[in-house]
Amino acid sequence: MTEIFYDYSKLDQPEVLQIIFHPRREAHTGPPPDNAVDNIITVDEGIGLHARFHLAGQEEPNILFFHGNGEIVSDYDTIGPFYTKFGMNFLAVDYRGYGKSSGSPTVTAMLADSHHILDAVRDWLSKAGHTGPLLVMGRSLGAAAALELASNHADDFAGLIIESGFATTLPLLMNLGVDVARLGITEEDGFRNVRKISSLTKPTLIIHGQYDEIIPVNTAAILQAQSPARAKEFQVVPGASHNTVIASAGELYFSMIKQFCNKICGIRAQRKRKSN
């Protein structure tokens, strides 16, 4: 599949970057938690991104995860074990300047780096003997990286999961206080998430908080409406805000994702039988 790269320079203006990204360093220098391994993924000369893989088993589904703008990989040390408890490998990766990663974050770098991350993850899974399907998942800002990969490398993924993600760029930037008119930013200069999801037919799961105050639930409905996937689900978590989806849903959150993975595995098995 031919990779499509857009010009994100309008989003790389300093006034936008300081709103979009909130990097912080990793304070903990010890080893990863039990049943997790760390890797540094080289994405450019002198630039390495920290990745932490929470492992459930070699045949389990693998979820490549891109987090929100104020989070780091180690924030998911208490969440990763729930994925493994439900039989899923959870592969969380930081952006430049986040956690133990080097460099400074920009939109152009984040989206370009996602392609290098995919190459590294595929190589690692293959060498480690992991045979389960690969899914890509993005939360909040991470939805942009997930959609970048899914739209450019659909054949590499069994499915897409978006949690608290956004469809259009301008409403989000304006909600965060960016003067888009003064900076000359149009929707065409944005992340183009709607365009990307509209080209993706792989199974898609969209999860969103009912009372999300940063990215209103109606923007998730836009993603759902624009997705041409025949197997797609839209789950609204009652009472949840932008940062309380897991807290509000509890273990049902992981059960929902596991059921989605199970359906994908069933589809894959069914297709394999038909091709024999």
Image (cartoon, grey):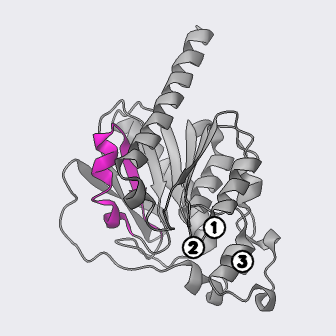
Q: Please, what is the three-letter code of the amino acid marked with disc 2?
A: Glu
The residue pinned by badge 2 equals 213
Q: Position of residue 127 (x, y in %)?
A: 36, 37
Asked whether disc 1 touches disc 3, contact meaning CB atoms under 8 Å apart, the reply is no
Where disc 3 sits, the SS reads helix
10 Å crowding of disc 3: few (<14), some (14-19), many (20+):
few
Which residue occupies 39% across, 71% down?
A: 101
Whole-angstrom CA distance, mark 1 to mark 2, is 6 Å
Q: Is residue 49 left or right of residue 52?
A: right
Which residue occupies 77% across, 55% down?
A: 195
Could you tell me which quadrant the C terminus lies in?
top right
Q: Position of residue 122 (x, y in %)?
A: 47, 42
Asked whether disc 1 touches disc 2, contact meaning CB atoms under 8 Å apart, the reply is yes
| Highlighted range, magenta | 72-95
Whole-angstrom CA distance, mark 1 to mark 3, is 26 Å
The residue pinned by badge 1 equals 216
The residue pinned by badge 3 equals 9
**Residue 75 forms part of the magenta stretch:** yes
Could you tell me which quadrant the N terminus lies in?
top right
N-terminal of the pair, mark 3 or mark 2, is: 3
